[in-house]
Amino acid sequence: ALAACSRAAVLRLPLLYGQVDCMADSAVTSLWNEVQAGVREFDAWQRCYPTHAADVAEVLREMLQLHFTGEPLRGIYQWQGSDMLTWHDMAKLVAETGELNAKDIRPVPDSPAVLLPRDNRMDCSRLCNLISVRPTPFREGLKQCMDPIRQRRNEQSQAQVGRLVSKKG
């Protein structure tokens, strides 16, 4: 984008999570499916900074406001969540938030077979100096995105129990 237009602004983002229609919609919430399917070992080597999609929307809104008030935004800007978590950490929190047993989820501390950066932290200072948005804490954002799905699942389970009870009655 910058090669094509020197006046462009690029926003780099890492691992995103947020409101989903089903758990498989995000790499973070899809961990729930993995735990439910019996996966018990998760990478505890790579450090990630999951970023809430609603925060990204606010960042973009503020960047546009700056642009429309005459502030030149050019080049590469970076944004990410502030909580450092491994995939193991995220799997445990997703399981707990999604009401699954997280006690037997184990860390895999070894580096992966494929070449990956150990720490995915990006320097967000250039953008943070321009905007007022602050990252949503991961636990809070995870609860916001998983609660509606968990609630639907619970309602469906209650409806099934109600149908079984009425058939027996």
Image (spheres, rainbow, N blue to C red):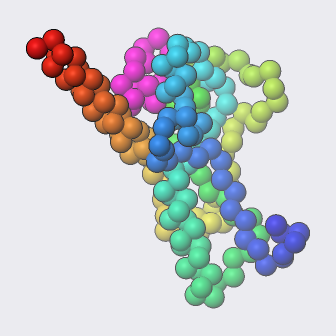
- Locate residue 40: give its quadrant: top right
Q: Is residue 34 left or right of residue 118?
A: left
Q: Is residue 124 visible?
A: yes
Q: Is residue 162 found left or right of 7 in the rendered image?
A: left
Residue 53: within the magenta? no
Is residue 108 rendered to the left or right of residue 136? right
How many circles with numbers are drawn on the protein?
0
Residue at x 63% of width, y 61% of height:
125
> Most extreme residue toward the left, as rendered?
169
Is 155 located above or below residue 126 in the figure?
Answer: above
Q: Is residue 51 above or below residue 158?
A: below
Where on the picture, by quarter, is residue 95? top left
- 11 horizontally vs 26: left or right: right
> Is any part of residue 106 visible from this angle?
no
Quadrant of the snapshot with the N terminus: bottom right
Q: Which residues are magenta?
A: 92-105
Front residue of 33 and 40: 33
Residue 16 percent across, percent down from the top left: 58, 46
Q: Residue at x 75, y 22 (%)?
A: 112
For image coordinates 62% across by 81% down, the residue present is 67
Q: Is residue 27 shown above or below 38? A: below
- Residue 108 at x, y percent in the picture: 63, 16
Instruction: Tell whether position 96 is magenta.
Output: yes
